[in-house]
Image: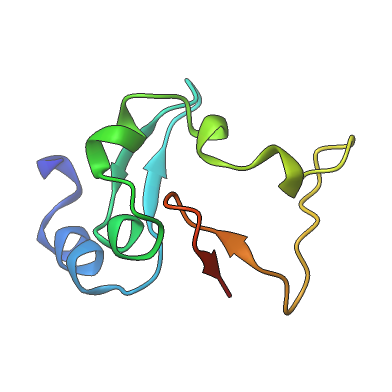
Amino acid sequence: MDQEGPQVDRFFELSPDLLCIACFDGFFKRVNQAWGDILGFSPDELQDRPFPSASFAADYCHGGHALHGEGEKDEQRDGAAQR
């Protein structure tokens, strides 16, 4: 996405954190490499489906609030535990 400019490009390239740009249509417009490094999803996989499907149903209670607390584990795409 060239419209954000070189500063945003550099920020996305250098950050070890999961970064994304998402729109109201429910799709990621851009994700950085950390998604692949941490969770095993390629940018194309994430951008081709609505982003709520990238979360785990067990992560949310009936009200839609995240249940994760400090010390709980997330699961990677390959099933490995991630702290």
Is residue 62 depicted above or below 70 in this figure? above
Quarter of the figure that contains the N terminus: top left
| Residue furthest out toward the right | 62
Q: Position of residue 75 (x, y in %)?
A: 56, 57
Quarter of the image holding residue 34?
Answer: bottom left
Please, which residue is most extreme toward the top here?
25
Of residues 25 and 6, the one drawn nearer to the viewer in this rendering: 25
Give residue 23's quadrant in the image.
Answer: top left
Q: Residue furthest bottom?
A: 71
Q: How many marks?
A: 0
Q: Give above or below for 48 relative to 16.
A: above
- Residue 40 at what x, y percent from top left? 34, 54
- Residue at 49% of width from left, 25% of height from top? 26
Left or right: 41 as drawn, with respect to 75: left
Give the position of the C terminus as an image quadrant.
bottom right
Quadrant housing residue 30: top left
Asked if residue 50 is positioned above or below residue 14 in the image, the reply reads: above
- Is 36 placed left or right of 14 in the picture? right
Instruction: Determine the residue positioned at 18% across, 66% down.
Output: 13
At 50% from the left and 54% from the top, the residue drawn is 79
Left or right? Give the position of 57 relative to 83. right
The residue sitting at 26% across, 45% down in the picture is 42
Residue 33 at x, y percent in the picture: 24, 59
Where 81 falls versus 24 (above or below)?
below
Which of 22 and 37 lies nearest the eye of the viewer? Answer: 37
